[in-house]
Amino acid sequence: MSGFGGFLLRRLIGALVTLLAISVIVYVVFYVTPGNVAQITCGPRCSPAQIQQVAEQLHLHDPLYVRYWHFLEGLVAGQDYSTGTSVQHCSAPCLGLSYQSDQQVTQLILTKLPVSLSLVFGAMVIWLVLGVGTGVLSAWRRGRLTERLLTGVTLVGVATPVFVIGLVLMIVVCGQLQLLPFPQYVGLTDDPEQWAWNLLLPWLSLALIEAAAFARLTRSSMLETLTEDHIRTFRAYGVGERAVVARHALRGALAPVIALNANNFGSAVGGAVLTETLFGLPGIGQELVHAVNVVDLPVVVGMVLVIGFFVVVANAVADVLYAVADRRVVLA
Amino acid sequence: MSLVNVTDLTVEFGSLRAVDGLSFTLEQGAALALVGESGSGKSTVAAALLGLHRGTGARVAGSVEVAGTDVGAASEDELRRLRGAKAAMVFQDPLSSLDPYYAIGDQIAEVYRVHTRASRRAARARAVEVLDRVGIPDAVRRSRSRPHEFSGGMRQRALIAMALSCEPDLLIADEPTTALDVTVQAQILDLLHTLREETGMGLLLVTHDVGVAAESVDDVLVMRHGRAVERGRVGAVLAAPSEAYTRELLDAVPRVDAPRARTQASLASSGSLASSGSGAAGSAEVVVEAVGLRREFGRGKRAFAAVDDVSLTIRRGETLGIVGESGSGKTTLGRMLVGLLEPTAGEVRHDGHARLGVNPAVQMVFQDPVSSLNPRRTVGESIADPLRARGERDEARIRGRVRDLLERVGLEAAHHDRYPHEFSGGQRQRVGIARALAADPRVIVCDEPVSALDVTTQAQVVALLGELQRELGLALVFVAHDLAVVRQVSDRVAVMRRGRIVESGPADEVYDTPRDPYTRQLLAAVPALDPEAATRRRTARREPAAT
């Protein structure tokens, strides 16, 4: 298994380099963005003197590379921050303090991340089951009524924005039928049952759209594998159609699905802003949008790095799954 | 009751009638070959025997009865019980015909379980048993390998093992050796022969290669345009065909055991007597020379030399045949001669001077006339490419020259504005030759120029190359895996193995009195057109080869 160890090591180094590059880009972007950060941070009623004081506290006058160096220092060794009256210690993987709330970004992420992960994990299970299932069915029943119906439904799914599906779901299920209360986030560790019930609608509305994309991909991928020679072999040897599809065609068709899933999972961790906003879920996406609006650099960098981390991890997992599914793939 | 009874079979795909009123029978334990060129409908017949056209949109009429099952009328379940259990099929490309994701043994076990309801363990044991039977060494361990871990010949053995697993009455083999090297082909044909002797199963062999048929079956059915041309004992049909088409087909087959059939013109222009072996080409000027050519691929531990220390000379007006099996480095060598690949060591000399990169004086004709022409451009434009590359700007002159070239290679000037898909395979290869001629080359390297073509087309293209050579004094390098074709076109021959030339010399000398054991092995593996000779040679092959 030295090959696998080497693969992990290379992947880890690659991920670190990627994440560092992302942080540099975010720093540069914010440095060149117009607007007075100290003014925005301090608020509209601050006097010029107060603004000056804030700017110094946040090291806004330092050149870019000095500020980036501070950021790296904090990340590796931790940092002490003076907030005017007291000194706050931010330990080792320190992403700095929020300009707005003086809260440690690491802490902020730790409170937001479970919400986002709960949302995306649950949605992923639904979109995979629904999407792959629909795709396989419509490839198998090609040219028949089932397929035309499914194709129509998935097209509508792809074309409908999440806030429409989410709103309709909420109005019908919570408002009209009153089957569920209006969603409100409950932690998994606090009450698993309530956690699931409250997340059901957000899961569905995020998953339905993703499922449509997966259904279309699975269908085209299945149609391709069904024309391959080895499928013909098993048909010519009297293996039943169900076994041919489930055992021989599906496995070959899943490779692009795994790749798409890695991508979509990673980006949904930070990108499910609409769903989070619609259902009032205090997740990463919502927080990121807010931080960008108020030019809260440490929070933005932290959030972007977390999202980047999940994209990289999801892709590495996809590569391993690839290699497990297809022994011809060499991890490199 | 006959094992196979086909009456008035017609198969249509849209407006195309692939099989047209074909009738034949095959008795228990007998072997019949369907022989024909591409498009003759032979593979369509094979698929119809297992009812594989069901649900594909093809229209099937007439009756097909296999091992007591009426294929046309059978229910899905009855059809499944026929497939694999009573009649099993072996396909042309053994790599793509096996599922890449599962171990070979598991795939065979799956098929066995579908038909016998055996336990998992028993099915797995059966898989190992049949793999052992088809000569896979260390079958227990190898049964856990996936198809890509097998060589081409081993894969075909595995597919045959799958066919054997349920002890079928009929084996349908659709071009079972077409994708294989000639030595491996001989092994697979021998295996099929042995298995037939041992199990008494019937064989329906579909092949384009008359030699393969002569090696393997009792009866042959020659097909053309979906109809039967001639049927009879294989020896009788090959020795004395009664139909004109069969004769034409047999005449086109290149012979490996006869000296090159030289035309008058060839003798006149080369000024040599063919019987003298080395020929006058031996004294003509050397146009291209390769000295110590070596080409490596990959780096570090994975590096290997595809071509290793190859030196050769090509003289004006002669044909040098380079023959070898897949992976022998012959294509890499050809590409280096043209300058498409840089040698890792050694050099290519033109007129005694070392040259790097491509040179208009050395042109190439590629194997696949479909993929080596741009489908979105007219053939006229493709042929004009070398002219434009040389700096010709006068459109009228370019057009005139392209028209000349088209007529030169036996096409019509009016074909100028047509697209590649409007041509047949042989015509496309003519376009490829015209493109090579456009640069006024002194040498043309032909990389498997006829291996994608039917024998009759093959013979025409070979004849064209010979004609051009005589008229233009071209030197040809003819790279091919087909020993018979190479003999029929070459003055001198080089036999390659693992990147090296193991033997070279005048063609007749190499073929009639091979010195290298590998050359002898290759020649012994070429199917003979005479079934009796085939039997003699099979017996000889069974004795341990001295390598």
Image: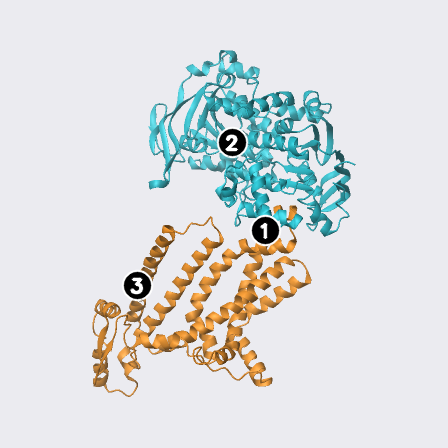
Chain colours: A orange, B cyan
For residue B506, side relative to residue B98 (left or right): left
Secondary structure under tag 3 reads: helix
Dot 2 alpha-carbon crowd within 10 angstroms: few under 14, some 14 to 19, many 20 or more:
many
Q: Which mark is residue B434?
A: none
A126 or B367: nearer the eye?
A126
Count of numbered marks: 3
Q: Which mark is residue A20?
A: 3
B259 or A8: nearer the eye?
A8
Q: Nearer the viewer, mark 2 or mark 3?
A: 3
Image spot of residue B464 (x, y percent): 56, 25
**Label 2 – label 3 distance at C-alpha:** 52 Å
Dot 3 alpha-carbon crowd within 10 angstroms: few under 14, some 14 to 19, many 20 or more:
few
Q: Indicate the chain on which mark 1 is placed.
A: B
Name the amino acid type tagged 1. Arg
Secondary structure under tag 2 reads: loop
Name the amino acid type tagged 2. Glu
Residue positioned 43% across, 66% down in the render? A266
Does B110 appear above or below A84? above
**Which label's residue is closer to the chain start, 2 or 1?**
1
**Label 1 – label 3 distance at C-alpha:** 52 Å
| Whether residue A230 is visible | no
